[in-house]
Image (cartoon, grey):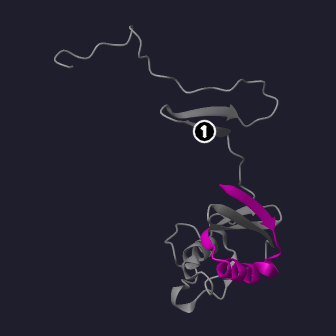
Amino acid sequence: MKQEIIQVPSSDILARAAQFKKDGYRLVQILCTRIPEGYELTYSFDRDYIMTNMRVIVPGEGSVLSVTGQFWYAFVWENEIHDLFGLKVECIAPEVDYGGHFFQLAKETPWHELANAKPPAAAFKVNMRSGLGIDATVKPAAPNTGAAAVKPAVPNTGASAAKPAEGGK
C-alpha cells in the first residue's frame, strides 16, 4: 500500500475533498488531535490501495467546514471532533448535526485542554511475522535512559513445562 501526507490550509478542505470524490477516492477517516498551535486534523482518502492523508492545522479558536456535502457519512467523525475536542465544524448536514450532543459525556469537550496532556509512557513496535503471531517490543519513551528494549515473556514450551492436572490430556 502506498501512502502519502499532504499539508493543506483549512480553507482548501472542501475543494480538496470534492476533488478526491471526483477522482473516485473514499473517505476512510478523519482524525483530530490537540497540538500547541490548536488542532491537527488528518483526512484519509483511499483508492486502489493508495492512501492520501490531507493534514490541516487549525488554530485553537478556529473552525473548519464540514465535508458532509461530499461524504455524507463524515458526520460521525465531525460530530465526534466537535463533542470531544470542542473544535467548531460548520455546516454539517442539518439532519445529522447533533450540536454538541452526539455523545453523552461526563465533562464537556474532555480533550479540548492541552495543559493536562501527557506523552505516552512507552512506544510499541509490532512486527507481524507469518505463522508466528505478533512480536511486540516495548521501548521506554524517555530519551537517554539507556534501558534496553523489553520483550514480553514467551511461554515455556520445553520439557520443564508444567504437566496438566490429573485427568487432563
Report the side of 163 relative to 79 (left or right).
left
The quarter of the displayed image where residue 79 is located:
bottom right
> In the rendered image of this protein, does residue 140 appear above or below residue 35?
above
Instruction: Report helix, strand or loop for mark 1.
Output: strand
Query: Looking at the figure, which quarter contains the C terminus?
Result: top left
Report the side of 103 relative to 138 (left or right).
left
Examine the structure image and report whether residue 3 is included in the region drawn in magenta: yes
Name the foreground residue: 126 vs 76: 126
**Residue beneath the point at 52% across and 66% down:** 106
Please name the residue that numbered disc 1 is placed on.
126
Name the foreground residue: 106 vs 128: 128
Examine the structure image and report whether residue 30 is included in the region drawn in magenta: no
Q: Position of residue 63 (x, y in %)?
A: 75, 80
Judge whether residue 113 can be spotted in this image: no
Q: Position of residue 77 (x, y in %)?
A: 59, 72
Identify the amino acid type marked 1. Val
> In the rendered image of this protein, does residue 11 appear above or below residue 44?
below
Name the foreground residue: 157 vs 167: 157
Magenta stretch in the rendered image:
1-29
State the count of labels: 1
In the image, farthest residue toward the left: 167
Query: Looking at the figure, which quarter contains the N terminus?
Result: bottom right
Q: Position of residue 153 (x, y in %)?
A: 52, 23
Judge whether residue 19 can be spotted in this image: yes
**Residue beneath the point at 18% across and 15% down:** 166
The quarter of the displayed image where residue 25 is located:
bottom right
Instruction: Tell me if mark 1 has few (under 14), some (14-19) or many (20+) residues whose alpha carbon lies within 10 angstroms of its own.
Output: few
**Residue beneath the point at 77% across and 62% down:** 5
**Residue beneath the point at 75% across and 57% down:** 115
